[in-house]
Image: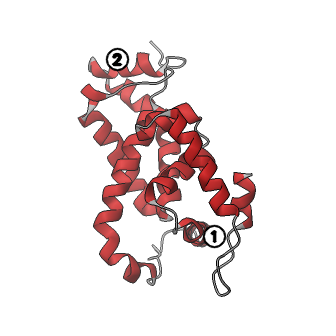
Amino acid sequence: MTLHGRTDPELWGAALAGDEQAFGELFARHGRAIYNYCFRRTADWSAAEDLASVVFLETWRRRGQVRMDEGSLLPWLYGVATNVLRNHQRSLRRYGAALSRLPEPVRPEEDADLVAARLDDQRRMREVLEQVRHLPRRDQELLSLCVWEELTYTEAATALGIPVGTVRSRLSRIRAKLKEPPPAPGHKRRNSALREELS
């Protein structure tokens, strides 16, 4: 029987019953979104790949607790990813400054154009993250889920385990804060593309 067209709850039920192919289909369906989310929070493609794998392993480890909102596993996965990223950031905090000054290692077998594009993506994402670094962590997480991952308010509320009203009020406050001019000369100008996304 083909897996094509089966819903997330159907695939999840099959996976719980021992169908490894069903879990693989869920990974194929949502893996790219989680990978991109991890990259946008870390600005590091290699770390994002490892973290995305951890998200799916952690989801399976906690399979008895999984809840699906509106028939999709994705909000739950974003919630797991947010927690995985928190742990990752805590573990790297004392090394972060030193690591950010080191160039990315280049594997000789990799295509030079691909390596250059990946390094450019990482540089640009680090610049964007620098623009929102002054926000509290919970606001950075909400911004990432709603603006970059395009989750609905309900999906973001599910991912973060907070009420929908809290999502709305926090986003309104974040938008207002990011549209403010820098407080003093010498501060970096905020990313105009980011301001446009928040409009």
Residue drawn at 45 percent across, 73 percent down: 107
Residue drawn at 56 percent across, 52 percent down: 143
User: Does 126 appear above or below 3?
Assistant: below
In the picture, residue 184 is in which quadrant?
Answer: bottom right
Q: In this view, does 159 lie to the left or right of 185?
A: left
Residue 27 at x, y percent in the picture: 43, 36
Quadrant of the frame with the N terminus = top left
Secondary structure category for the residue under label 2: helix
Secondary structure category for the residue under label 1: helix
Q: What residue type is labelled 1?
A: Asp
| Front in this rendered view, residue 30 or 197 | 197
In primary-sequence order, the first of circles 1 and 2 is 2
Q: Residue 95 carries which label?
A: none
Residue 30 at x, y percent in the picture: 49, 36
Residue drawn at 71 percent across, 60 percent down: 195
Residue 175 at x, y percent in the picture: 65, 54
| Front in this rendered view, residue 166 or 80 | 166
Q: Which mark is residue 14?
A: 2
Q: Residues within 10 Å of mark 1 (few under 14, many from 20)?
A: few
Q: What residue sits right under mark 1 in the picture?
A: 113
Residue sitting farthest toward the top: 1
Residue 138 at x, y percent in the picture: 45, 53
Residue sitting farthest toward the bottom: 186
In the picture, residue 105 is in which quadrant?
Answer: bottom left
Q: Is residue 187 left or right of residue 5?
A: right
Q: Which amino acid does label 2 sit on?
A: Ala
User: Does 10 appear above or below 99?
Assistant: above
